[in-house]
Amino acid sequence: MKFENLLERQLLFFDGAMGTMLQSAGLPAGEAPDVWNLTHPDKVTSVHAAYLEAGCDVVTTNTFGCTAHKLARTGHSAPRIATAAVRNARAAIAQAGGRARFVALDIGPTGKLLKPLGDLGFEDAFCMFRETIEAGAAAGADLVLIETMSDAYELKAAVLAAKECCTLPVCATVTLDRRGKLLTGGDIASITALLEGLRVDALGFNCGLGPREMLPFLEELRALSSLPILLQPNAGLPREVGGETVFDVNPDEFAALMEDCARRGASLLGGCCGTTPAHIRALTKRCAGIAPLPITQKRSTVASSYARAVRFGEGKPVLIGERINPTGKPRMKQALRDGDYDSILREGILQQEQGVDALDVNAGLPELNEPAVLTALTEQLQAVTDLPLQLDSADPDALARALRVYNGKAIINSVSGKESSMSAVFPLAARYGGVIVALTLDERGIPEDAEGRIAIARRILARGAEYGFKPHDFLFDPLTLTISSGSENARVTLECVRRLHDELGVCTSLGVSNVSFGLPARGYLNANFFALALGAGLSAAILNPHAPGMMEAARACTALLGADKTCAAYIEAYGGTAAAPSPAPAQQQMSLYDAVLKGLRQPAQEAAERALQQKEPLAVIEESMVPALNAAGERFEAGTLFLPQLLMCAEAAKAAFSVIRAHMGDAAGVGRGTVVVATVQGDVHDIGKNIVKALLENYQFRVIDLGKDVPPETVVDAAVAHGARLVGLSALMTTTVPSMRRTIAALRESAPGCLVMCGGAVLTEEYAHDIGADFYVRDAMESVRRACEVYPGA
Amino acid sequence: MKFREEETLRYLGAKGAPDEQTSALLRDAAAQLDAIAAPRHAVLRVRAELSGTRVTLGAFQADCAALAAHLAGCGAAYLFAATLGAEVDRAMARLAKLDVARAFALQACAASALECFCDDTCAALAQECAAEGLYLRPRFSPGYSGFSVVHQTDLLRALQADKRLGLAETDSHMLTPLKSVTAVIGLCPEKQPCPEHKCALCDHLTCNYRKEPQK
């Protein structure tokens, strides 16, 4: 009998705590319990035996800390320990005899935070998990139990490792705090989407809470998930008594609470911290004979980021921002070519502020290495936004790489009815999870009528089913063609939307603005077509949230179609409009110089627009911007204006410059000179570097920002590649200053013409010179002055 | 979250009474921090055993003269860790792309809020200890005054900070999330004279953020 065959047929009982049991058997505090698999196998086997004797069906190997990072100082390898651990568990089962029992290979977190929060790379985490799982599977484990995960990204790395290196069933549990959140911010809905997308066999919660506190979260999970649920709570909430952690829920109480959990839908039951064989004995006795509640299939179409899930087809339309796409945007093209993602990240954040629910990400330019760029954009966007991403590419390799690093369950844009497309995209979606955007076109093109497009949709559904996809895994896009090339085009698309919704019961998505291509006043057509499509049952739209009328149409239709209860969202968006006071006339007429110097963004932009009506862009820069920035800099250095004010000036200037540059076109040029900035390797505090960057950009320097924790060779490579004559290095902590010294030495070696300026709270002039820097910069303005010296008169 | 405006302004490099815009910047940062911070702490009371420079605090051991000096006279200590959570880091990263003034204000506000949170947590611990006639020494953190940052590893491990708080370290022993603290807090039977401010405990005399820098 296999473990997976018993899922859903009966309750399955897991064991309880291991570490505390080993401590009572003599494991000294602070010593890695995993090592005891090798040094004290009899003691480990005894713990397993006690749980088996208590009636559990599954024993969990003593491998919670069995990853290379946690074992680093023990002198033992993870594979060796995992192998011994499975052997110990198997030995206990063999000794117990009787009915079928199973060995779960336990996989706990690495103990590190993944990038960008920490410094562990996603693939490094994947490799750590893989070596343990490979060894455990080879040694004869029956399933993989990934548990106590508190970060969605690490969870994904572990599940992928399990899926890619063995065929064992995978159970995955996360630890929640009392708000029902993961420690790094995910929620139950986002984790459920991620794990179901990755096709685990069971999911649930462990550790952190007692059974009483877990119960409401069980209800939430059961309402969302279509998988068996595993609960392994602590024996209550931990309490500190005289330096010891104690748990208050006794075995009988634990069993009673767990019975409640079983009757409400948990079908795999065990314990975590504070639970003992006595708890498990009480549990198995009390719950024996309870049949698991049947699981209902939820059929939800849901995508997620690390932090939030977005559901399609449940009333409110899902709005997907389309702006991160270089087609027709020369500046974005240039930014993508230069690897300068800041403006693109800003575009993502601004779309979020406009109220979209997800972001489309497209890097499809013929001259770009699309797989590399789409992957980098995905990594960088998910560091600054918690919106789910729609990965948009016709290149399966680009999709594969971006899907792998994506922290959540992505929207995959797209597959079509072409066999080549389906055979390339479906395996990726099966491996990484995702809501699949399916275009109703095939080798013969786009059918003119609705019937033809519906027929393609049916074929896609049938072919997708071979890979295990259900209708709710798709978002069908019946394609919007412009009415300028055929007056029936919009009507056909709308008919498709309606029929896909009514006849096939699937969710739909449209790129709405195509409808008006080639016509004047496109906004009217777009907004009205969008409204009609929503009326026809459209679930999602790819749109420009900055375009007048689109967000208004979305909010209005949501209210009109009854998906905005009590019109709350509509009122929140527009309720205050009439009452908003008009700005004071004096402020409206503020000069550009004053607006920048006072650090007022909006007035600075407006003043720049007014100034440009009267003067050439270069004159506006020379006569207003430069004097304002100089005045701010002088006041800062004189101590009459402080850093926050200087930074507000910088932001106002940046806003004004963006207006001015838009008027300059190609004449905007590449700036005064290139400065590479980085927070040195080992240091993760980058606010100082970010401030320097903001000011340098204001003074029209081209800044190559390498981020934080940057290895010396990366700094050297960037300085050489960009021909920078100046590099700025920052370090906040004393302990990372030696890393600054190494970086300078590397620059001297390979980029001898390049000057180096250093700054940071712990640095002094003397120290900076001692480590070989050319300049010590005590604040951000000084870095600007140094840059001006290095690039005089540029 | 509670934070100290004066301290925050010092982190921001602002002197004197803030102008209206700086005040607004701070108000916004404070409001944002309230929405995203998830302050958590872990504390473990242990016996303190000193032998020369060797310090044993339960599962945590260190050979460190500065720590031994800090714990002189203490029979027990708290191992302590606190964090404002990952969302604050994410917000700072987001603002760094959008508006560096707001990013700067948020990080300053978070730094002060973390201090307040630690102070309040320690005040509660002090109250518990007072009943036993014990007093808390100031928090003593790896990376300061001769207490090497390499001890971060064992301190985090002893507290199971990854599992309980989502708090970890980088290879160079920096704490992640950034707005986090670890410390050892001695418990001694005599009340020690407290320094006027925490900077007086630190031997980094030229630090830009030092109160009343000694030149």
Image (cartoon, grey):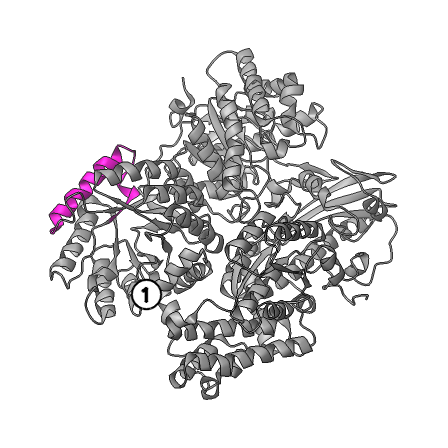
In terms of depth relative to the viewer, which is nearer, B172 or A144? Answer: B172
Does residue A270 appear anywhere in the picture?
A: no
Q: Identify the magenta region.
A: A448-476
Q: Residue at x 58, y 35 (%)?
A: A234
Does residue A477 appear anywhere in the picture?
A: yes
Q: Residue at x 69, y 60 (%)?
A: A761
Q: Where's residue A669, x and y in %?
A: 44, 69
* Three-letter code for the amino acid on which mark 1 is drawn: Met
Q: Quadrant of the N terminus of chain A?
A: top left
Residue A133 is inside the magenta segment: no
Q: Is residue A605 left or right of residue A745?
A: left
Name the residue furthest bottom. A586
Q: Chain of mark 1?
A: A
Residue A460 is inside the magenta segment: yes
Q: Check disc 1 and report its element: helix, strand or loop.
A: helix
Q: Can you identify the residue that label 1 sits on? A: A551
Q: Residue at x 62, y 61 (%)?
A: A688
In terms of depth relative to the viewer, which is nearer, A403 or A320? Answer: A403
Q: Where's residue B119, x and y in %?
A: 72, 57
